Amino acid sequence: MRHVLQTKINIAAAPEDVWLHLIDLPAYSAWNPFITEAAGTAAVGERLTIRVQAGDRASTLHPTITVADPGRVFEWLAHVGMPGMFSGRHRFELTPTATGCQLVHSETFHGILVRPLRRSIETSTRAGFEAMNDALAHRVLVERAA
């Protein structure tokens, strides 16, 4: 089973400025309501430790970075349980716009647990993505104004 969750937000800042906040993993705890802790190096092949808060559930994951294209794409892949149970390819895509950039924040889920978790993905996980998007846009603008 496969399911794609996608959110978008326009941010009044250059992709390069937004990128700096996306890859500053230790700072996530200061501003990010969805990924409340993150550690590791933002480079392809590196393994991260992230703590995700989706609704009333929190979980710690150890994804591997699959894409780190500065100012454009940051992506990682996480697996839960045995192969084929549940995995997610989490992706941030930045595209320049006339007023800054658009962030497409998405995740493609695979595995046999996707179907029973689909409602949770569409409610609490989507809410987490949107909260993170809003917090990121706010952080970028506050930092730029400082």
Image (cartoon, grey):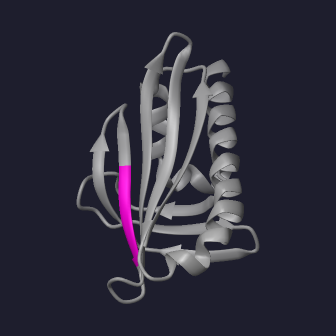
The question of residue 70 being in magenta is answered with no
- With 53 as the anchor, is 105 left or right in this view? left
Measuring from the top left, give residue 124's x and y in whole percent: 71, 64
Placement of the N terminus among the 4 image quadrants:
bottom left
> Which of these two is toward me, 22 or 114?
114
The correct choice, above or below, for 28 with respect to 1 in the image is above
Q: Is residue 31 visible?
A: no
Q: Residue 95's x, y, as percent?
A: 43, 26
Residue 112, horizontal then vertical, whole percent: 44, 82
Along the horizontal axis of the image, is 142 left or right of 66? right
User: Could you say where residue 145 lies in the image, as x and y percent from the top left?
Assistant: 67, 19
Q: Which of the two residues, 63 or 108, is positioned nearer the viewer here?
A: 108
Image-based side of 130 in relation to 62, left or right: right
The answer to whether one can see residue 72 in this image is yes
Residue lying at 34% horizontally and 56% vertically, measured from the top left:
41
Magenta span: predominant SS is strand
Query: What residue sits 37% from the left and 31% below the top?
Result: 71
- How many callouts does the rendering have? 0
For residue 2, which quarter of the picture? bottom left
Residue at x-position 56% and y-position 12%:
99
Residue 77 is a magenta residue: yes
Q: Is residue 25 placed above or below 20 in the rendered structure?
A: below
- Quadrant containing the C terminus is top right
Which residue is drawn at the image coordinates 57% and 63% (left, top)? 37
Task: Please state the extent of the stretch shown in magenta in the rendering.
Answer: 75-79
Outermost residue, left side: 45
Residue furthest to the top? 98
| Residue 11, quarter of the rendered image | top right
As drawn, the residue found furthest toward the right would be 56
